[in-house]
Image: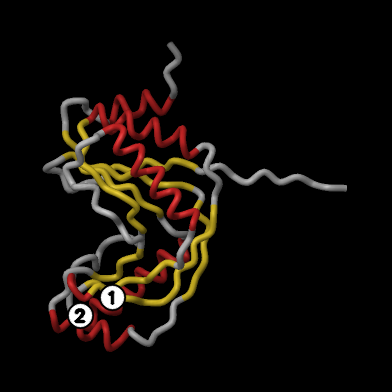
Amino acid sequence: MFISNLDKNLGALISNSSIYYCLIVINPENQICQDIKAIKRSFKLKHGKYGGSESTAHITLNREFLDGKELKKFINRLKEELSTYYTFDLHLNNYDFFFESNTFFISIEESSHLANLQRLIATQLKMIKPISYLGRYRFSPHMTIGRTLSHRQFSEAYYEFERQVYSKKFRVNDIAVLYSQIGDSRYESLYLPLKNEDWAVVY
């Protein structure tokens, strides 16, 4: 039986008997990561440390607890599905707020490509684990700047960012699967590429 390099690597990295917390995310291009890092640093200097102040910019699409066998199976199935899913553009568009959780973030314009991608990921997770530990929480994709802020910090964030403009577009070329063994704060990451559009030259 043919064993791919991905299978070999997963076998070495992931223990079948362990439980992992798994995040499926989109990482934006480097310039946007630098923008978000600067925004977080500035807010932290003015208002103190807060939830999410040290995290790298990303957009969470889904999450789940999986054992090692389930995780390897999920990664391999997702890799196969994404190999036929074309790259697409996402538009980040201004700041917004979740008042119930004292969170502020950069919102994402509606995208059928993103919605379909979320459904694809959710379907693969459901096939691997029909009964979810996390109750199939429905994500509203966004790029978090700060979460679970104190009431004072959240008020300052609203006052400072409510009228500010942020608009950037980037190409989604791959999806990152981040996984961490329960009890370990370190995450391993695996990048699964999307299919590049085929270009034809017409003479």
- Residue found 23% across the figure and 72% down from its top: 103
Count all numbered tags in the image, as a single digit.
2
Q: Nearer the viewer, residue 187 or 110?
A: 110
Badge 1: residue crowd in 10 Å (few <14, some 14–19, many ≥20): many
Which quadrant holds residue 159?
Answer: bottom left
Q: Amino acid at mark 2?
A: Phe
Residue 63 percent across, percent down from the top left: 26, 47
Badge 2: residue crowd in 10 Å (few <14, some 14–19, many ≥20): many
Q: Nearer the viewer, residue 132 or 18?
A: 132
Which quadrant holds residue 115?
Answer: bottom left
Seen in the image, is 111 located left or right of residue 188?
right
- Residue found 29% across the figure and 37% down from its top: 126
Question: What residue does disc 1 label?
Answer: 97
Q: Nearer the viewer, mark 2 or mark 1?
A: 1
In the rendered structure, find residue 81 and report the number of the disc placed on it. Answer: none
Question: What residue does disc 2 label?
Answer: 154
* Label 2–label 1 contact, CB within 8 A: yes
Residue 116 percent across, percent down from the top left: 45, 50
| Element type at mark 2 | helix
- Residue found 36% across the figure and 28% down from its top: 9
Q: Amino acid at mark 1?
A: Phe
